[in-house]
Image (tube, coloured by chain):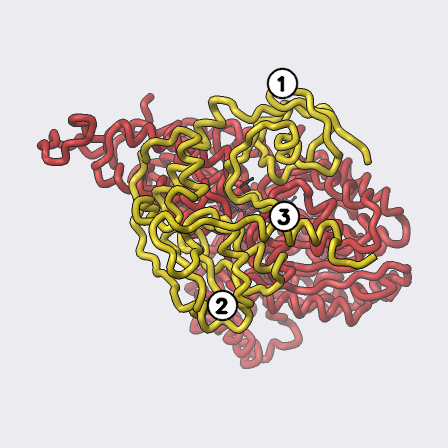
Chain colours: A red, B yellow
């Protein structure tokens, strides 16, 4: 394979484009409401209408507005026209398509009518997005490498291998300002530089696709919608740091992502885009999948590596960091799925282009899984620094049925709740951290006034308690005790001393736990205490006789706080 | 052999560069509480009792796994550390059923000794009173999960000193527990060599010699130390 072959594949793919391309979402969200049946029905309807020569029904990845799925969009271009990436996405968008309605949808191509609900591709939900990672999502066919190549795929890999030294690649990454999307936001270029600098006969690359936060599905969508872009990013990273073997760690709960990755790896190998002597250079790189059993802690890098080695997935103290001593003690580069998905676009369009998006300290975009009490739930990608209010009110369309938003939870079980009055906060690593939350991997749950914040804290603590690996004492026992104190508060049996004990435990677990799971487990409590302390205190009972005399009649419980206006303001 | 100089609680110390903070402290006669650490087996940093403050580091660092570096300034006994240690111990006592008065290890228990030493005189958290079993199927030893603190010393000596690989950890979080072979009764284990190193390594009354009664269970660590030293110094290899 050389560049001519690549261009030939791309041109052939573009030339074979039919007049109408009907894109039908085949990502897990829409599949759950039978989009596979829709795709089959569309194929059949095309056959029956005899339109095979003019119509391609294309299974694609996530089309983002997941709450209205199955989604189908029709793009029409006169045959022979050169269609660029980005020219699509303009045609009529149909919502909640059923297999039964497929014939009427096909009939619209020949002037017929359909009663299907139409979405607006010009709505802010779509136009306010700035897709880099998701640029191909919902457009290319994730099961055909030709479709990715037609969207300029693997060109960056060619250019890197043939025209750049590994050091230039690392320098480009540093200049781009990309920070890791797995949660901590560590500068990606610096991490690559450390691995590149460590002398070793053997190095590894790992793509972290564990994605264990409840409610998060960004990485799954990327893997399902555009697997080749992750493979290309990994290959570029491998060249930059000097690794020849990569692993993608995906949880077994993501069967569709796994099967698409398997297909993608097979196709890339067949075309010589993975394997030995890629693009007729001396560079060799292979990728294997490792399937995780679905433990949250296995997303933590040291636990993940233990799991890849076939050991029990529990974290170990760092240092040494994976960059010095990782898989089987060899230097290892570990990055998140979304981090790798940014690599090929950066190499293609340049570090300056990437660095011009976002804020001073946080470059590029971030994908969020928008969920909860909000009109448009689904997948969004916005520039770093976009105000939370814009995400929630403009893209998300606000709370449904005119409800009032009370808080937004970011960062999953390691994150926190941001009160409605802080909605003007720009969404970037540092601003969220200042409010006691974190960016995390990109889960975003919107809560309305009916939400009881103590119960939210209890929910996340229960998750951490169940997912604690049990290795270190503070997290293993502390999460159990914090959970039971929260339950006691919710049952109105706790006193001010219990609340004090809870706060003391939060501080202790946060500062003494071994890994990030324990260190961040108190965050949901700390952040709800910060903004909604009155909801906790309203549930406390008086400390009768120091709480010792259980038979002493307790005073009347305080009035329910549940639905009242939130904070102490 | 390069040396590093550092200060621990204001005292100047000089140690080999391969030493951990704990090694350096022991050398200098400074006490740091430990529970999961056992001389001779590798450290895992799990109990978090040995956490110390290091100037310039925002995180507390485990003395047992952190290597020394030049000019390090270490505090081992601040009010904050004492408080965290007390809470950690309280948590351990609340977690399972540590009833000293009826324990084989009473008077010889590292958990009990640490609690005395750290001034932990009562437990402010709710006792969990979990229902754990006692495995007494082995001909020589017993395993009482009620007294296990999951320090994994036994697992480490079993794998790395004896090389039998009988003991392991199964389950997650509060459900984590020590198992033998493929989670089967210890007495039916094919791999156990009955060497007893696990019993010697256990800090509490969780692993015991059968027939021992309250307060009788004393550990013979000299045997473990002998093997570890012999291995480290290659004493069994003839010149
Ligand atoms: C409990 C825990 C769970 C984590 N889960 C994930 C995960 O699912 N995916 C991920 O990419 N990183 C996860 N991380 C972060 C990783 O340890 C690591 O920092 C990340 O993969 C590095 O990639 P990045 O630099 O590209 O962000 C987790 C961390 C912790 C402490
Ligand atoms: S903090 Fe929790 S998850 Fe992390 S090592 Fe300790 S027990 Fe395991
Ligand atoms: S002795 Fe260091 S963490 Fe247990």
Relative to residue A88, is residue A324 depicted above or below?
Answer: above
Res A328 quadrant in image: bottom right
- Describe the element under mark 1 as helix, strand or loop: loop
Task: Judge by depth and name the residue closer to the eye, B131 or A370.
Answer: B131
Give the CA separation, mark 2 to mark 1: 69 Å
Q: Which residue position holds label 3? A: B40
Chain identifier of the residue bearing label 2 in the image:
A
Chain identifier of the residue bearing label 3 in the image:
B
Task: Judge by depth and name the residue closer to the eye, A492 or A207.
Answer: A492
Residue beneath the point at 58% across and 54% down = B156
Name the spot of residue A129 as percent of width and height, x first.
58, 43
- Describe the element under mark 2 as helix, strand or loop: helix
Task: Judge by depth and name the residue closer to the eye, B114 or A38.
Answer: B114
Q: Is residue A70 visible?
A: no
Residue B10's disc number: 1
Chain identifier of the residue bearing label 1 in the image:
B
Disc 3 and disc 2 on one polypeptide chain = no
């Amino acid at each position: 394979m050389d560049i001519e072959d690549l261009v030939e594949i791309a041109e052939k793919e573009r030339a074979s484009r039919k007049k109408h391309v009907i894109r039908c979402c085949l990502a897990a969200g829409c599949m759950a409401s039978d989009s596979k049946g829709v795709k089959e029905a569309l194929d059949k309807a095309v056959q029956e209408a005899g339109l095979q020569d003019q119509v391609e029904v294309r299974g694609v990845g996530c089309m983002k507005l997941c709450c209205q799925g199955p989604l189908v969009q029709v793009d029409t271009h006169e045959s022979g026209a050169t269609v660029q990436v980005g020219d699509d996405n303009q045609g009529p968008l149909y919502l909640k398509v059923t297999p039964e309605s497929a014939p009427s949808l096909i009939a619209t191509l020949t002037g017929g009518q359909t009663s299907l609900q139409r979405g607006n591709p010009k709505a802010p939900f779509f136009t306010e997005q700035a897709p880099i990672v998701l640029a191909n999502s919902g457009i290319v066919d994730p099961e055909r490498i030709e479709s990715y190549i037609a969207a300029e795929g693997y060109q960056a890999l060619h250019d890197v291998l043939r025209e750049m030294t590994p050091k230039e690649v690392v320098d480009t990454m540093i200049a781009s300002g990309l920070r890791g999307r797995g949660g901590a936001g560590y500068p990606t270029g610096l991490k690559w530089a450390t691995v590149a600098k460590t002398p070793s006969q053997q190095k590894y690359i790992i793509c972290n696709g564990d994605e264990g936060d409840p409610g998060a599905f960004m990485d799954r969508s990327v893997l399902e919608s555009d697997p080749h872009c992750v493979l290309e990013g990994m290959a570029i990273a491998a060249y930059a740091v000097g690794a020849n073997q990569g692993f993608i760690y995906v949880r077994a709960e993501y069967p569709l992502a796994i099967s698409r990755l398997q297909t993608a790896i097979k196709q890339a190998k067949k075309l010589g885009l993975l394997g030995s002597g890629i693009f007729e250079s001396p560079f060799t790189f292979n990728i294997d999948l490792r399937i995780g059993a679905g433990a949250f802690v296995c997303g933590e890098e040291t636990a993940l590596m233990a799991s890849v080695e076939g050991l029990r997935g529990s974290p170990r103290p760092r240092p040494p960091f994976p960059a010095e001593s990782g898989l089987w003690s060899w230097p290892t580069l570990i990055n998140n799925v979304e981090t790798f998905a940014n690599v090929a676009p950066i190499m293609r369009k340049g570090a300056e282009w990437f660095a011009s998006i976002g804020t001073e300290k946080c470059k590029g975009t971030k994908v969020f899984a928008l969920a909860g009490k909000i009109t448009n739930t689904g997948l969004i990608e916005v520039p770093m620094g976009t105000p939370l209010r814009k995400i929630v009110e403009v893209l998300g369309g606000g709370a449904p049925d005119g409800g009032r938003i009370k808080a937004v939870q970011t960062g999953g079980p390691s994150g926190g709740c941001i009160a409605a009055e802080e909605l003007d906060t720009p969404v970037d690593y540092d601003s969220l951290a200042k409010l006691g939350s974190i960016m995390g991997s990109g889960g975003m749950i919107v809560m309305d006034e009916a939400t009881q914040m103590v119960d939210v804290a209890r929910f996340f603590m229960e998750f951490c308690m169940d997912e604690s690996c049990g290795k270190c004492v503070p997290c293993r026992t502390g999460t159990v005790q914090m959970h039971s104190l929260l339950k006691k508060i919710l049952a109105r049996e706790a006193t001010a001393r219990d609340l004090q004990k809870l706060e003391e435990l939060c501080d202790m677990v946060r500062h003494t736990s071994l890994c990030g799971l324990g260190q961040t487990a108190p965050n949901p409590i700390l952040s709800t205490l910060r903004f909604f302390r009155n909801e906790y205190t309203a549930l406390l009972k008086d400390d009768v006789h120091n709480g010792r005399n259980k038979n002493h009649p307790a005073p009347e419980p305080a009035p329910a706080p549940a639905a009242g206006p939130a904070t102490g303001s | 052999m390069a040396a590093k100089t550092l200060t621990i609680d204001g005292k100047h110390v000089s140690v080999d560069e391969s030493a951990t903070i704990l090694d350096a402290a022991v050398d200098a006669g400074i006490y740091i509480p430990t529970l999961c650490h056992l001389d001779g087996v590798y450290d895992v940093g799990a109990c978090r009792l040995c956490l110390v403050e290091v100037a310039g580091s925002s995180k507390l660092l485990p003395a047992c796994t952190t290597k020394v570096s030049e000019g390090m300034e270490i505090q081992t006994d601040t009010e904050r550390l004492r408080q965290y240690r007390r809470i950690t111990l309280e948590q351990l006592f609340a977690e399972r059923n540590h009833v000293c008065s009826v324990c084989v290890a009473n008077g010889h228990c590292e958990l009990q000794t640490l609690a005395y030493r750290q001034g932990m005189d009562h437990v402010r958290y709710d006792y969990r009173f979990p229902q754990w079993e006692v495995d007494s199927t082995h001909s020589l030893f017993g395993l009482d999960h009620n007294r296990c603190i999951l320090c994994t010393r036994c697992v480490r000596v079993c794998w790395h000193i004896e090389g039998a690989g009988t003991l392991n950890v199964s389950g997650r979080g509060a459900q984590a527990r020590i198992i033998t072979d493929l989670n089967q009764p210890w007495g039916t284990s094919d791999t156990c060599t009955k060497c007893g190193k696990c019993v010697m390594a256990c800090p509490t009354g969780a692993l015991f010699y059968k027939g021992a009664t309250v307060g009788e269970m004393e550990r013979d660590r000299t045997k473990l130390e002998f093997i570890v030293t012999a291995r480290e110094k290659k004493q069994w290899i003839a010149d």
